[in-house]
């Protein structure tokens, strides 16, 4: 059986170390390279062949949606598994539409992670049962789209971060963007959704299950 060569990209050293050990402890797969941000991940993908990229949803550099696009542009056939600390329903549908082949929370049990890696490396997609229910509901023909669906991927990302109580300065730092840029995104979010304040954003996100 050919070895599954994996690139992992995450800006947290200890998580990368643990993930690498977990993968390398399982037969038939190996972490062949690591990256600390999206830009470095794309550089390594352009210069080497991998069977799978495992990407953190929140890293310095391109936002996850743009990053998936860059990965697909560099290696059209290479699947992407996205890991996140956020609840499954926050980004799932958008990430699959962007080209991801799987989406897991970082607290997932090892057997599920390894099963997902094997399935995705073979060209399949991994969706947890709970996520499958969410996606079926969201993508249903008769489903009434909530107003946050009108947001761009970056606007949606900022909205979720605001809903989690992050300050504009903290969001700017985490996304490696200017404070004025985040303020502009906030203004667009309020305009498109009809919300007025951060408190409204938090309440909306709670009501629609965007934050736990």
Image (cartoon, grey):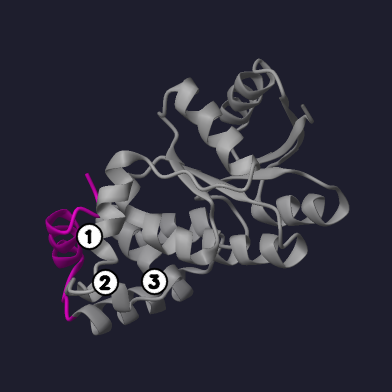
**Nearer mark to the viewer, of 2 and 3:** 2
Query: Residue 26's quadrant in the figure?
Result: top right
Q: Residue at x 43, y 69 (%)?
A: 153
Residue 2 on the magenta span? no
Q: Which of 189 and 92 is in front in this view?
A: 92
**Nearer mark to the viewer, of 3 and 1:** 1
Residue beneath disc 2: 148
What x and y, as percent, mark residue 72?
A: 68, 63
Q: Give the range drawn in magenta.
A: 194-212
Mark 2: few/some/many CA within 10 Å (<14, 14-19, 20+): some
Above-or-below relation of 185 to 122: below
> Is residue 50 something that shows in the picture?
yes
Above-or-below relation of 171 to 211: below
Mark 1: few/some/many CA within 10 Å (<14, 14-19, 20+): few
Query: Mark number for residue 137?
Result: 1
Mark 3 touching mark 1, by CB under 8 A? no
């Amino acid at each position: 059986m050919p070895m599954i060569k994996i690139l992992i990209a995450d800006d947290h050293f200890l998580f990368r170390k643990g993930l690498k050990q977990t993968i390398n402890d399982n037969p038939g797969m190996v972490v062949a390279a690591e990256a600390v941000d999206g830009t470095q991940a794309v550089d390594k993908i352009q210069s080497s062949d991998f069977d799978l990229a495992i990407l953190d949803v929140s890293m310095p550099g391109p936002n996850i949606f743009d990053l998936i696009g860059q990965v697909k542009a560099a290696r059209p056939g290479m699947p992407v598994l996205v890991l996140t600390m956020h609840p499954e329903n926050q980004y799932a549908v958008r990430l699959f539409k962007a080209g991801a082949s799987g989406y897991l929370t970082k607290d997932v049990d090892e057997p599920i992670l390894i099963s997902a890696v094997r399935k995705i490396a073979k060209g399949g997609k991994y969706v947890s049962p709970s996520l499958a229910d969410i996606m079926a509901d969201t993508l249903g023909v008769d489903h009434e789209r909530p107003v946050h669906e009108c947001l761009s991927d970056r606007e949606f990302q900022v909205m979720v971060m605001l809903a989690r109580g992050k300050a504009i300065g903290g969001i700017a730092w985490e996304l490696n963007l200017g404070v004025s840029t985040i303020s502009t995104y906030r203004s667009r979010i309020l305009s498109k959704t009809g919300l007025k304040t951060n408190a409204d954003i938090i309440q909306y996100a709670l009501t629609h299950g965007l934050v736990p």
